[in-house]
Amino acid sequence: MKTNNLPVFPLGIVALPGTIQYLQIFEPRYLKMVKDCMSNGHGFVIVFQSSHSNGIDTEISKKGSYVEIIDFNNLPNGLLGITVKSINKVIINDLTQLEDGLHIAKTQPLVDPEVDDQALLAEFPELTNILSQLVKHPKINDLKLNVDFNSADSIAYHLAGLIPISSIYKQNLLEAFDAAQRFEILSKYIDEISSN
């Protein structure tokens, strides 16, 4: 498997593959990171880092997502706004911090075991139904999401990106063994919120 040295951006969000994130960049180390990424034609890695209630950051997750910058603009508040698309999951190895505070790491694409997509979609039809209803909403339609309704992963990741779900739950989905496990997690979560 190909290993890449890439900048790592620890955040309180999880960028699930195929989903779009809007970020506001203001710290000098991340402004420089964005400039370098755009100059050299590569993306960076978003990893989940939760904060305790006292504001202290916890450990950075070992699995994250490789994202590419698809748009940027200067915001009215003076910050740089960037739109990124999550391309694939990666494993983080040899995380180091540079003098300016930016993290870099050796990253490796993480590929799940194959599953029978059609059997999985037939077992959990409600997940496809919910997503197909959501993508018809005008605001979601404007996002121009590229959902593959024949792919269990595409359905799981896009659905999790659109429903109100905590970052810790999203990280569990990202780290799940395969699409079948992701569907199980999502199905249980939807049952929980439906019964409340």
Image (tube, helix red, strand yellow):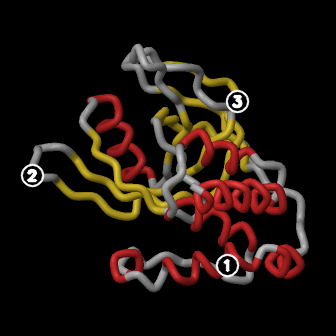
Q: Nearest the camera: 6 or 183?
A: 183
Res 88 → quadrant: bottom right
Q: CA distance from mark 3 to mark 2?
A: 37 Å
Q: In the displayed orientation, state which residue is furthest to the front.
A: 196
Q: Would you name the residue on which mark 1 appears?
A: 128
For badge 1, the amino acid type reads Thr
Task: Point out which mark residue 93 bears.
Answer: 3
Question: Counting other residues with Cα less than 10 Å from the Cα at mark 2, is it few (<14), some (14-19), or many (20 or more)?
Answer: few
Secondary structure at badge 2 equals loop
Residue drawn at (76%, 49%) of the image: 110
**Residue 139 shown left or right of residue 154 in the figure:** left
Instruction: Please name which of the two marks, 3 or 2, marks the residue nearer to the observer.
Output: 2
Secondary structure at badge 1 equals helix
Quadrant (top left, top right, bottom left, bottom right) of the C terminus? bottom right
- Residue 93 lies, with reference to residue 137, above or below; the image says above
Earlier along the polypeptide chain: callout 3 or callout 2?
2
- Residue 45 lies, with reference to residue 96, above or below; the image says below
Res 33 → quadrant: top left
Q: Nearest the camera: 74 or 149?
A: 149
Instruction: Please name which of the two marks, 1 or 3, marks the residue nearer to the observer.
Output: 1
**Residue 142 shown left or right of residue 129 in the figure:** left
Q: Position of residue 140 (x, y in %)?
A: 40, 75
Q: Position of residue 43 (x, y in %)?
A: 49, 51
Q: Would you name the residue on which mark 2 appears?
A: 76
Residue drawn at (47%, 24%) of the image: 51
Earlier along the polypeptide chain: callout 1 or callout 3?
3
Q: Position of residue 150 (x, y in %)?
A: 73, 83
Secondary structure at badge 3 equals strand
Q: Are marks 1 and 3 in contact (CB under 8 Å)?
A: no
